[in-house]
Amino acid sequence: MGNTNKENYTVLHLLPCHWEEYKSIRLEALETNPEMFGSPYAKESTYSEMEWKALLENKYRGMFALYHNQSLIGLSGVTIKKDNTATAIFFASYIKPAHRGKGLSNLLYEARMEWVRLQKCQFITVSHRAGNESSEAAIKRFGFKYSHTEPVNWPDGMKADELTYLFQLNQS
């Protein structure tokens, strides 16, 4: 992991007024790395302004943007599981290639974990496609424990395993 001055990086919890920034980084992620996401570019590129805003208005979901100085360079999300509100799910993580390998995912993990604590969840799950070593390393670095593997038909047309991990929050 390279040395990074974290003072030049900030994380922002996105609000509906940030919908255009959210749309731009999300579509970039889906277009450049379709193999890493559970939703295809072709679907999300057709979303209306109202649909993008609705995603950011949902009180059971938090989207976080990563900035280097004033430039948007990353995105990550968290949602509360519909059938089990004690569990949150981390998803949609993306950092532009020029900023990868610097430990910046830690900033997004910290922001999402704080959001989960405020929601009073007890567990967090996160998953990655088999072969995504950088995702796996970040997940393990934050103390998530392997839970299980399932075969998945991904939006890019490939079938590959999805590895899921679990984190239990301390009850205070």
Image (cartoon, rainbow, N blue to C red):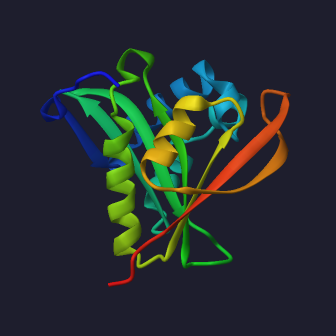
Counting the numbered discs, the total is 0
Residue beneath the point at 27% across and 43% down: 11
Q: Is residue 33 left or right of residue 170?
A: right
Q: Is residue 117 left or right of residue 155?
A: left
Q: Camera-side residue: 86 or 147?
A: 147
Residue beneath the point at 70% across and 27% down: 35
- The location of residue 164, given as percent across then percent down, is 67, 53
Q: Is residue 25 above or below residue 85?
A: above
Residue beneath the point at 35% across and 21% down: 99
Query: Can residue 15 be seen here?
Result: no
Residue 48: quarter of image? top right
- The location of residue 25, given as percent across then percent down, is 45, 30
Q: Is residue 71 above or below residue 16?
A: above
Q: Is residue 85 left or right of residue 148?
A: left
Residue at the farthest left position: 7
Residue 4: quarter of image? top left
Residue 145: quarter of image? bottom right
Q: Is residue 160 above or below residue 113?
A: above
Q: Camera-side residue: 44 or 88?
A: 88
